[in-house]
């Protein structure tokens, strides 16, 4: 049963932190260089910053000192302990909502005085893997794994629940028989009230998703108020990041495929033979790039037939990497002769990030934006890889918004991965609060961080 909870409880957990040892700051690992200004650029002035507690509980992973890399002078504190915290949204009355698919609920955090732990209460419970959250005025949209709901939000309470999109595929869909790797949904609301929802692929290269009803590996759209969705964009393997930019366009950050075959008739590993069709870890490490794309009606992001190509010199193991305005190359496993989809006809992808970054939450920061030279832009929670060697580290990335589009990736917050590749934290989403601070969810550490710039 899905219930709406009105009770209030105060947060009982805060963290005891301090500085960590230098060996905890792991590098991202070797790889090809990136073209200057084309993505993967780490802000050069990032500095080691102690993660500060708002209390003294010291619960793991904060039972030892931790540091992150952040812009100089910025502070990072653990604002709340929220097990399995995922996506975030601010309410009109300045409460921070946190979705928790694992627990089937949405929590509301009410800020207190500066430096205080927020009050915490359950706003919604009994839901089916709630994930995406979005507001349009006083209407709250919540994406469950099988549907999207709307609620009227007033004075810290929700009412008038309505199912605006129903029948979305998830691991309970009879035809899938539990075989669904990307059941969680994200939701965004267009300036005209249109509802957009991400529907991930069944698996890594499940071609049947493109012919399913409703179609999977898509961004679906309904008019304001809901209804039967139509395909807005397809070939989107898992567009968990979903947001609307300041001009009203919809963007998605995509978790792309794994274990890609080398697609060129070239010698990549240096053994003297052609490697087309081989799965080479050295190639898989950086291919295909994860996409950050502006969507238009009918756009195709290629999956599983075409992959965005980060190599400046395709097929060259020493090629620099670029993640800006990148073309597509055919997928040798699914589209060997190009008959399934003509990759050359697909528009280049506006931005991206390294393969296996696993982007999750996406949000736009409107003018004046972040302090200093950052300004307006997009924030992406990078969860980090599961199959890259060495692992790609988690971070919070920033993409500057200039002249109606996004610039290349900049690392804003990192240091959650240790030198041995293990992690004490994995950011999911970052949003700017009404106070100008950044609030970052971390489902691995079970925390929400508050990140502030110097006054």
Image: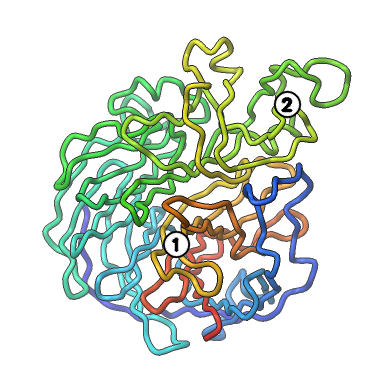
Quadrant position of residue 234:
top left
Q: Is residue 310 above or below residue 359?
A: above
Residue at disc 1, secondary structure:
loop
Q: CA distance from mark 1 to mark 2?
A: 40 Å
Question: Which residue appears farthest toward the left when viewing the image?
Answer: 160
Please tell me which of labels 1 and 2 falls first in the chain: 1
Q: Position of residue 141 (x, y in %)?
A: 25, 55
Residue lying at 30% horizontally and 75% vertically, measured from the top left: 94
Question: Which residue appears farthest toward the right when viewing the image?
Answer: 271
Q: Is residue 252 above or below residue 367?
A: above
Q: Is residue 113 left or right of residue 227?
A: right
Residue lying at 52% horizontally and 40% vertically, measured from the top left: 291
Residue lying at 37% horizontally and 64% vertically, measured from the top left: 98
Q: Position of residue 332 (x, y in %)?
A: 61, 18
Q: Nearer the viewer, residue 302 or 123?
A: 302
Q: Position of residue 361 (x, y in %)?
A: 45, 54
Q: Is residue 132 above or below residue 287?
A: below
Quadrant position of residue 259:
top right
Question: Which residue appears farthest toward the front when viewing the image?
Answer: 403
| Residue denoted by label 2 | 315
Within 10 Å of disc 2 (Cα), the crowding (few <14, some 14-19, many 20+) is some
Q: Is residue 339 above or below residue 380?
A: above
Circles 1 and 2, Cβ within 8 Å, touching? The answer is no
| Residue denoted by label 1 | 85
């Amino acid at each position: 049963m899905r219930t709406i909870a009105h009770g209030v409880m105060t947060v009982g957990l805060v963290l005891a932190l301090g500085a960590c040892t230098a060996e905890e700051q792991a590098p991202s690992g070797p790889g090809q260089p990136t073209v200057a200004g084309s993505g993967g650029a780490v802000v050069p002035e990032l500095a080691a910053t102690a993660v500060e507690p708002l209390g003294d509980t010291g619960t793991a992973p904060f039972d030892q000192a931790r540091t992150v890399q952040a812009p100089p002078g910025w502070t990072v504190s653990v604002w709340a302990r929220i097990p399995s915290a995922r996506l975030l949204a601010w309410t009109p009355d300045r409460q921070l909502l946190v979705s928790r698919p694992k627990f089937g609920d949405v929590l509301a955090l009410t800020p207190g005085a500066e430096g205080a732990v927020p009050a915490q209460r359950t706003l919604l419970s009994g839901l089916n893997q709630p994930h995406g959250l979005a507001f349009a005025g006083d209407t709250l949209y919540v994406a469950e794994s099988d549907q999207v709901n709307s609620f009227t939000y007033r004075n810290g309470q929700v009412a008038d629940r309505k199912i605006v999109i129903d029948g979305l595929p998830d691991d309970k869909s009879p035809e899938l028989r539990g075989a669904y790797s990307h059941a969680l949904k994200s939701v965004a609301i267009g300036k005209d009230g249109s509802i957009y929802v991400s529907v991930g692929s069944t698996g890594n290269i499940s071609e049947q998703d493109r012919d399913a009803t409703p179609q999977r590996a898509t961004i679906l759209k309904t008019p304001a108020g809901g209804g039967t969705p139509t395909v807005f964009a397809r070939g989107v393997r898992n567009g968990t990041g979903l947001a609307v930019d300041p001009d009203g366009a919809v963007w998605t950050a995509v978790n792309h495929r794994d274990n890609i075959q080398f697609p060129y008739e070239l010698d990549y590993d240096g053994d003297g033979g052609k490697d087309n069709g081989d799965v080479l870890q050295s190639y898989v490490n950086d291919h295909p790039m994860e996409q950050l794309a502006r969507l238009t009606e009918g756009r195709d992001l290629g999956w599983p037939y075409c992959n965005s190509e980060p190599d400046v010199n395709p097929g060259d193991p020493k090629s620099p990497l670029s993640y800006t305005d990148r073309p597509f190359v055919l997928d040798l496993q699914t589209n060997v002769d190009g008959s399934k989809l003509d990759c050359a006809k697909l528009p280049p992808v506006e931005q991206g990030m390294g393969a296996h970054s696993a982007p999750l939450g996406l949000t736009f920061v409107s003018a004046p934006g972040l302090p200093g030279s950052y300004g307006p832009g997009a924030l992406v929670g990078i969860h980090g890889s599961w199959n890259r060697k060495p692992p790609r580290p988690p971070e919070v990335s920033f993409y500057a918004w200039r002249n109606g589009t996004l610039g290349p990736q900049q690392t804003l917050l990192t240091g959650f991965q240790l030198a041995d590749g293990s992690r004490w934290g994995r950011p999911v989403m970052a949003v700017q609060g009404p106070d100008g601070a950044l609030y970052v969810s971390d489902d691995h550490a079970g925390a929400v961080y508050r990140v502030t710039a110097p006054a």
